[in-house]
Amino acid sequence: MEVKVLFFGVLAEVSGTYFKHYREVKLLSDLKHRISDDFPEIVHYSFRISVNNEITDNDILLKSGDEIALMPPFSGG
């Protein structure tokens, strides 16, 4: 099982990448722990999480091929 994590804005700068693949993660909470292990500085930033283009605050079960986006606050005009 593999999911793809997209990093936007300052989170791409902090992580040094725009995306990363993770294997063997079943829950969103497990994925968050793996990301914070890989990029410890990321915990100092606020961001929202979307799974397959839907923002969620819940600990959901992930499926192979899911796309998870980490999005810091942004504004537009």
Image (spheres, rainbow, N blue to C red):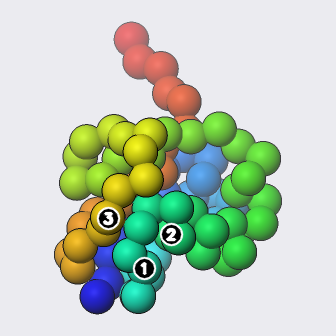
- Label 2 – label 1 distance at C-alpha: 6 Å
Specify which label sits upstream in the sequence, 3 or 2. Answer: 2
Disc on the earlier residue, 3 or 1: 1
Q: Secondary structure at mark 3?
A: loop
Residue at image position (70%, 43%) is: 45
- Which residue is label 2 attached to? 31
Image quadrant holding the C terminus, namely top left
Q: How would you rate the neighbour count of disc 3 (Cα within 10 Å): few for under 14, some for 14-19, many for 20 or more? A: few
Circle 3 residue = 61
Q: Which mark is residue 25?
A: 1
How far across and down, in percent of the image, does residue 48 sit? Answer: 49, 39
Asked whether 72 or 75 is in front, the reply is 72
Label 3 to label 2: alpha-carbon separation: 10 Å
Helix, strand or loop for disc 1: loop
For label 2, the crowd category at 10 Å Cα-Cα, with few meaning under 14, some 14 to 19 and many 20 or more, is: many
Q: Amino acid at mark 3?
A: Leu
On the rendered structure, is 13 left or right of 7? right
Q: CA distance from mark 3 to mark 1?
A: 9 Å
17 sits to left or right of 37? left
What amino acid does circle 1 point to? Answer: Val
